[in-house]
Amino acid sequence: MGDINEQILEEIGEQLRIQREKIYYTLKDVANMTGLTTNTIAAVERGKGASLNNFILICRALKIQPHTIFKKQIDLTPLYNIPPESKRRIEMTKELDDLVYNSNFFEIPRRVSDIIRQLNANKEQSNKFSVYLSSYCEEGTLEYEKHGNYKEYRKKHSPKPVKKYSK
């Protein structure tokens, strides 16, 4: 897969070189406009040593929109699979989002232990769930009430509008 990335970088570099030559700029002209060395620009054009910063600097100098360089679709298959513990965290986060946003689970006050039981999660993750629930409170979706050393979370309901009567 690394070879695929090298090939993509070489194609990008070639596109930059073609554009540079098309507008009659030398490597030194682009170097003066970017603050990069001619060696760095030549390396980028060969598909070597490219950084996103250098790419954008060169695009600015050549007055070329970066998206025009990407003419072909790029295979976006990751080099490695996501670790199982990350997959589980993502699944748990989705399940918790579903409980918060798409169910009536939080219509009654719930403790972290209730949520762990509902999601069939490990009790050792209670601190993580407390952090997640705090973020829902910060965004205004949930609110909590403290009872001694634990909190109960529930959906935050906007107050009912008060009717104003004119005399």
Image: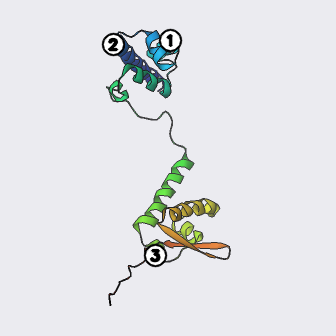
Residue marked by disc 3: 107
Q: Disc 2, disc 1: CB below 8 Å? A: no
Q: Position of residue 89 (x, y in %)?
A: 54, 53
Q: Position of residue 92 (x, y in %)?
A: 51, 57
Task: Decide which of tag 1 and tag 3 comes sooner along the chain.
Answer: 1
Q: Identify the element where label 2 is drawn.
A: loop
Q: Residue at x 60, y 72 (%)?
A: 151
Q: Identify the element where label 1 is drawn.
A: helix
Task: Decide which of tag 2 and tag 1 comes sooner along the chain.
Answer: 2
Q: Disc 1, disc 3: CB below 8 Å? A: no
Residue 157 appears left or right of 130: left
Residue marked by disc 1: 38
Q: Residues within 10 Å of mark 3 (few under 14, many from 20)?
A: some
Residue type, mark 3 in image: Glu
Residue marked by disc 2: 23
Q: Nearer the viewer, residue 82 or 15?
A: 15
Task: Decide which of tag 3 and tag 2 comes sooner along the chain.
Answer: 2
